[in-house]
Image (cartoon, coloured by chain):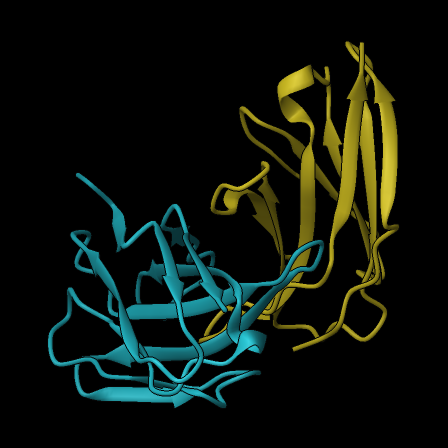
Chain colours: A yellow, B cyan
Amino acid sequence: DAKTTQPPSMDCAEGRAANLPCNHSTISGNEYVYWYRQIHSQGPQYIIHGLKNNETNEMASLIITEDRKSSTLILPHATLRDTAVYYCIVRLATGNQFYFGTGTSLTVIP
Amino acid sequence: NAGVTQTPKFRILKIGQSMTLQCTQDMNHNYMYWYRQDPGMGLKLIYYSVGAGITDKGEVPNGYNVSRSTTEDFPLRLELAAPSQTSVYFCASSYSSVGAGNTIYFGEGSWLTVV
């Protein structure tokens, strides 16, 4: 599975959009991009995933560049409860393992 | 549905002791996983299983053993506890990897301290 690179930490003002970047320059054509988040001391929670097209659900939007070498997770209106560590993961659709990196620690500031 | 259930939630072990972390899921998932998370770090895959009777090593398997006798249960065994195994352990499960977008569901974690 391709490796990912994320900034270690970010801040975002409450009510503003939080844009979390992820680089995955070695991604292959059949690998998906997944985003999870982990609120302190809890198990990671699924947010969204995508292959090529941009995706949106009730939690967030995922923007994948045309060359698929990077992506951005967007939380449109960040709240204090969005303070968490966000993990970007690349894996095969038929892969068995999810490999987590160190993620981005997002702090939403009142 | 209860989802993924882990026990115990907290445990203190003495060096050299053995114990088993229990994990069960009621979602009929084929795939199950054990991760550990050290303070301030990401999750590391210890072992995983693609179905009953089948297990395989992840990134950090040394010092651990697993078994998968049923679809529902995936216990993690520590044979000779060492201080380096002090960590938070997460069990997880997912649907079969056939097809795209199979997400992974986590338990609430088990805090283990070895002294």
Q: Specify whether A43 is left or right of A32.
A: left
Q: Is residue A63 above or below residue B17?
A: above
- Which residue is at a point 24% across and 71% down the rendered structure image? B74
Q: Is any atom of residue A104 visible in this view?
A: yes
Q: Is residue A103 above or below residue A19?
A: below
Q: Quadrant of residue B94?
A: bottom left
**How far across and down, in percent of the image, does residue A63 sit?**
76, 42
- Quadrant of image for the N terminus of chain B: top left
Q: Specify whether B56 is left or right of B23.
A: right
- Most foreground residue, B104 or B65: B65
**How far across and down, in percent of the image, does residue A76 sit?**
73, 20
**How far across and down, in percent of the image, does residue B16 sit?**
40, 85
- Most foreground residue, B83 or B36: B83
- Which residue is at a point 83% across and 54% down the rendered structure image? A6
Q: Total of numbered circles in the picture?
A: 0
Q: Is residue B83 above or below residue B25?
A: below
- Most foreground residue, A63 or B17: B17
Q: Specify whether A25 is left or right of B96.
A: right
- Which residue is at a point 45% across and 88% down the rendered structure image? B63
**How far across and down, in percent of the image, does residue A65 sit?**
83, 51
Q: Specify whether B96 is left or right of A7.
A: left
Q: Is any atom of residue A52 visible in this view?
A: no
Q: Quadrant of residue A40?
A: top right
- Which residue is at a point 87% across and 28% down the rendered structure image? A11
